[in-house]
Image (cartoon, rainbow, N blue to C red):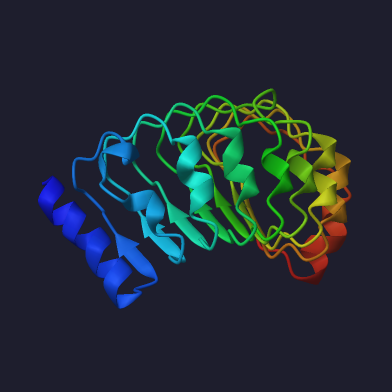
Amino acid sequence: MSKSLKKIVEESREKNQPEVDMCDRGISNMLDVPGLFTLSHITQLVLSHNKLTTVPANIADLRNIEVLNFFNNQIEELPTQISSLQKLKHLNLGMNRLNTLPRGFGSLPALEVLDLTYNNLNENSLPGNFFYLTTLRALYLSDNDFEILPPDIGKLTKLQILSLRDNDLISLPKEIGELTQLKELHIQGNRLTVLPPELGKIVDDHLFI
């Protein structure tokens, strides 16, 4: 196994390949992949369907990364260093075991798509600066444990897709009405009995629920 992973790393370095795919390789620790964190040129890293339980601080060495895919692992925590990835646009952490996000997570300046589907997150899991992620266009929080959605959601004014299905939401904050670019709002499978009237204007304009 490690030989073929080593070869992937070597080929990426020698041929200056920007995309590295290590999907479904049984990897339990990124530090076990020889030379992975020397690939400072790569823009895309796929590590979906592995056995990762954590992400090392060395992730910060991949300073040109734009797409990180950790879908379907067993990740329980992220390092604070992940927020130093200045070019990261797309982060997929769906189907993991996260119950919190690291302090400072909201300082990712270029993030457009964040997928946190199927984790163990709730409103207390989000760091104070989470809603500074004002570049977000798509936020996937389905299949978590949210009972309330913080009013600061209204700060994510570029959101076009907000997925909240299969949580424990009792209500939505009126600030959701400030998301004037919203095109899709997925709220099935919650405990919502009423929707804020502020949603009405967006629905009338272009929102699909």
Q: Is residue 182 left or right of residue 140?
A: right
Of residues 125 and 173, the one drawn nearer to the viewer in this rendering: 125
Rendered position, 196 above or below 52: below
Residue at the outermost bottom position: 15
Tell me, yes or no, if residue 6 can be seen here: yes
Q: Position of residue 147 (x, y in %)?
A: 67, 25
Q: Position of residue 162 (x, y in %)?
A: 65, 52
Q: Quadrant of residue 183?
A: bottom right
**Quarter of the figure that contains the C terminus:** bottom right
Of residues 65 and 77, the one drawn nearer to the viewer in this rendering: 65
Rendered position, 116 above or below 13: above
Of residues 17 and 199, the one drawn nearer to the viewer in this rendering: 17
**Residue at the image point whose x is 13% and y is 55% from the top:** 4
Q: Quadrant of residue 96?
A: top left
Q: Position of residue 172 (x, y in %)?
A: 77, 37
Q: Is residue 24 left or right of residue 106?
A: left
Rendered position, 91 above or below 97: below
